[in-house]
Amino acid sequence: MLEDDDRKTRRGRPRFAPGRSGNPRGRPPGARNEASLAVEALLEGEAAALTRKAVEMALDGDRVALRLCLERIAPRRRDVYVSFELPPIETAEDVEKAGAALIAAVAAGRVPVGEADKIMALLVAQKGLIEAGEHERRLTRLEEKFGRRRGAGQAAPPARPGLRNHGDHPTRSNRSETAPPGRDAGNDKGRQRDP
């Protein structure tokens, strides 16, 4: 039977102090699960016989054994390597040309549709990177032309006069300021208030 101190720590409070692990060094690298070690010990020396039996069952028509054998003989391929010509990609327009070449390769049967989807995602990502780089270069040229370049530590330019906060629009006012007298500013239909 558990002592009173053990029961309190297990039921009332955590067994370990807050912020402290019961195993501060963690599991050692390469440590194996006890169940896996036990299974390996049981099967040691029997691998050849078990494999032979699985093959016999597969040959006798056992579908599960057949699938197991086939998965071991020819595992499912994760990646498919395809080769086809793409034009050089240096601009966003080049990405569009590469996309057209990819679609032509799919139509000709040289690239599987599933792989084309992955390649197209790469092309779209490449186009985004190219456009971001082009945008940054244009912005830098404009800032150099007009002599305005904000450094990393400089503050943002002051807000435009007439704007009360970042949510206000220069052509719009608060509804409460524009509501005619006798009208409810919060009511979209503009009905008169009840006295």
Image (spheres, rainbow, N blue to C red):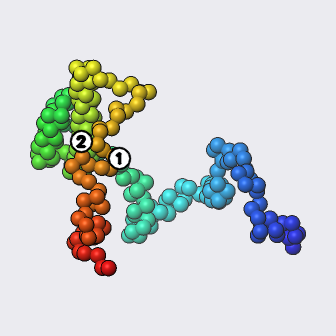
Query: Residue at (22%, 20%) from the top-left corner?
Result: 145
Label 1 belongs to which residue?
165
Image coords of residue 136 (percent x, y): 27, 29
Rendered-image quadrant of the C terminus: bottom left
Which image quarter: residue 186? bottom left
Rendered-image quadrant of the N terminus: bottom right
Q: Are marks 1 and 2 in contact (CB under 8 Å)?
A: no
Query: Residue at (22%, 72%) from the top-left corner?
Result: 189
Local SS, label 1: loop
| Kind of residue sitting beneath label 2 | Val
Marker disc for residue 21: none
Which image quarter: residue 135? top left
Total residue callouts: 2
Vertical position of residue 5 compared to residue 78: above or below: below
Label 2 belongs to which residue?
124
Image coords of residue 194 (percent x, y): 30, 79
Of 71 and 171, the residue lying toward us: 171
Q: Nearer the viewer, mark 1 or mark 2?
A: 1
Vertical position of residue 180 compared to residue 86: above or below: below
Side (left or right) of 1 relative to 173: right
| Kind of residue sitting beneath label 1 | Asn
Local SS, label 2: helix
Vertical position of residue 25 compared to residue 76: above or below: above
Query: Residue at (50%, 63%) from the top-left corner?
Result: 53
